[in-house]
Image (cartoon, rainbow, N blue to C red):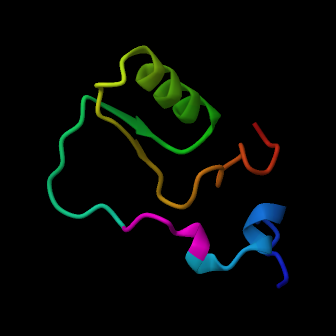
Amino acid sequence: MTAAPNDSYWTSAIEQAQANLEPALDGAHTADVVCVGGGYTSLVTAYLLKKRDPSLDVVILEGNHVGFGSSGRNGG
């Protein structure tokens, strides 16, 4: 498989179906905390919130895949 210019090695090494583990968000949902974007800041924030209070409902919303933006291309 040939990687696109902005794809990471990980993305190019797996089947696209495996990368899309969760279905698109559909309908109304609630959460205690919503982190927008799947970059380092959102992931660490979500992780630390859940570690501090496991009862929190923490959701990460990412339009593409985790690390898609500059986090995944060492541009951050």
Q: Measured along the vertical axis of the image, is residue 63 above or below residue 55? A: below
**Can you give x and y, in whole percent of width and height, for residue 71 in the image?**
71, 43
What is the quadrant of the N terminus in the image?
bottom right
Q: Is residue 41 visible?
A: yes
On screen, residue 16 versus residue 52, left or right, reads right
- Closest to the observer, 33 or 55: 55
Image quadrant where residue 24 sits: bottom left
Q: Residue furthest top?
A: 52
Q: Is residue 57 magenta?
A: no
Residue pictured at 59% horizontal, 52% vertical: 66
Numbered disc total: 0
On screen, residue 18 versus residue 15, left or right, reads left
What is the quadrant of the C terminus in the image?
top right
Q: Is residue 8 visible?
A: no
Residue pictured at 55% horizontal, 45% vertical: 38
Give, as a single range, the part of the protein colored magenta: 18-23
On screen, residue 13 versus residue 65, left or right, reads right
Q: Is residue 19 magenta?
A: yes
Q: Residue furthest left?
A: 28
